[in-house]
């Protein structure tokens, strides 16, 4: 397996695993995402699509490599949003003050607002080993993106 193949596999596996964790915690764990949680997912959705394209184009090395780089940048962007979100949760940065919800239309708007879960971006819903989910996303995404970029830039060794 070449370095580019490893980078391609990581570019697909990392966002898939992080999205599975985020969606699993939402639908099975009852943790409702805030607005910034959704922003973090966008980078992973994009990276997943780009990594799939990198696999589809693996017969064309330069194009496949470009999609791996773009996938790594998508993962890195999710990590950057995660770092900002973790900073908001820790009180390092001032978060966004707007809380929004949409009514279901045709019903009682006040009842819809009161029944919707209010999820604030500046409050940690779940921590593991002292880091929030946003903090873990920042750490894992940033480290993974760096490894993917490093692997994709390595040139194959010449056989002696």
Image (cartoon, rainbow, N blue to C red):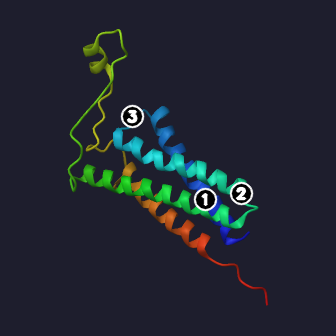
**Mark 2 to mark 3 CA distance (whole Å):** 37 Å
Q: What label does residue 36 carry, if any?
A: none
Image quadrant holding the C terminus, namely bottom right
- Check disc 3 and report its element: helix, strand or loop: loop
Which of pointers 2 and 3 indicates the residue nearer the eye?
A: 2
Count of numbered labels shown in the rendering: 3
Give the residue pinned by disc 3: 32
Residue 87, quarter of the rendered image? bottom left
Left/right of residue 26 with respect to residue 81 in the rendered view = right
* Relative to 142, residue 112 above or below: above
How many residues crowd around disc 1 within 10 Å: few (fewer than 14), some, or many (20 or more)?
Answer: many
Which one is earlier in the sequence, the residue at label 2 or at label 3? 3
Pick whichever, 159 or 32, lies toward us. 159
Note whether residue 72 is visible: yes
* Relative to 84, residue 150 above or below: below
Disc 2 and disc 1 in contact, CB within 8 angstroms: yes
Give the residue pinned by disc 2: 57
Disc 3 and disc 1 in contact, CB within 8 angstroms: no
How many residues crowd around disc 3 within 10 Å: few (fewer than 14), some, or many (20 or more)?
Answer: some
Name the residue rendered at 46%, 45% in the picture. 41
Q: How far across and down, in percent of the image, does residue 52 sit?
A: 65, 51
Name the residue rendered at 58%, 49% in the picture. 48
Give the residue pinned by disc 1: 67
Image quadrant holding the N terminus, namely bottom right
- Check disc 2 and report its element: helix, strand or loop: loop
Which one is earlier in the sequence, the residue at label 2 or at label 1? 2
**Mark 3 to mark 1 CA distance (whole Å):** 32 Å
Q: Residue furthest bottom?
A: 160
Pick whichever, 137 or 127, lies toward us. 137
Which one is earlier in the sequence, the residue at label 3 or at label 1? 3
């Amino acid at each position: 397996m070449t370095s580019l193949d490893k980078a391609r596999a990581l570019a697909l596996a990392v966002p898939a695993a992080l999205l599975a964790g985020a969606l699993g915690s939402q639908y099975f764990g009852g943790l409702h995402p805030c607005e910034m949680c959704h922003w973090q997912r966008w980078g992973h959705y994009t990276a997943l699509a780009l990594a799939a394209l990198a696999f589809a184009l693996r017969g064309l090395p330069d194009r496949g490599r470009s999609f791996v780089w773009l996938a790594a940048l998508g993962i890195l962007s999710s990590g950057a949003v995660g770092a900002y979100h973790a900073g908001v949760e820790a009180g390092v940065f001032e978060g966004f003050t707007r809380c929004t919800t949409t009514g279901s239309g045709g019903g009682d708007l006040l009842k819809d607002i009161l029944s919707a879960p209010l999820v604030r971006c500046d409050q940690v819903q779940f921590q593991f080993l002292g880091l929030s989910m946003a903090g873990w996303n920042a750490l894992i995404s940033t480290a993974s993106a760096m490894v993917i970029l490093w692997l994709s830039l390595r040139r194959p060794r010449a056989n002696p």
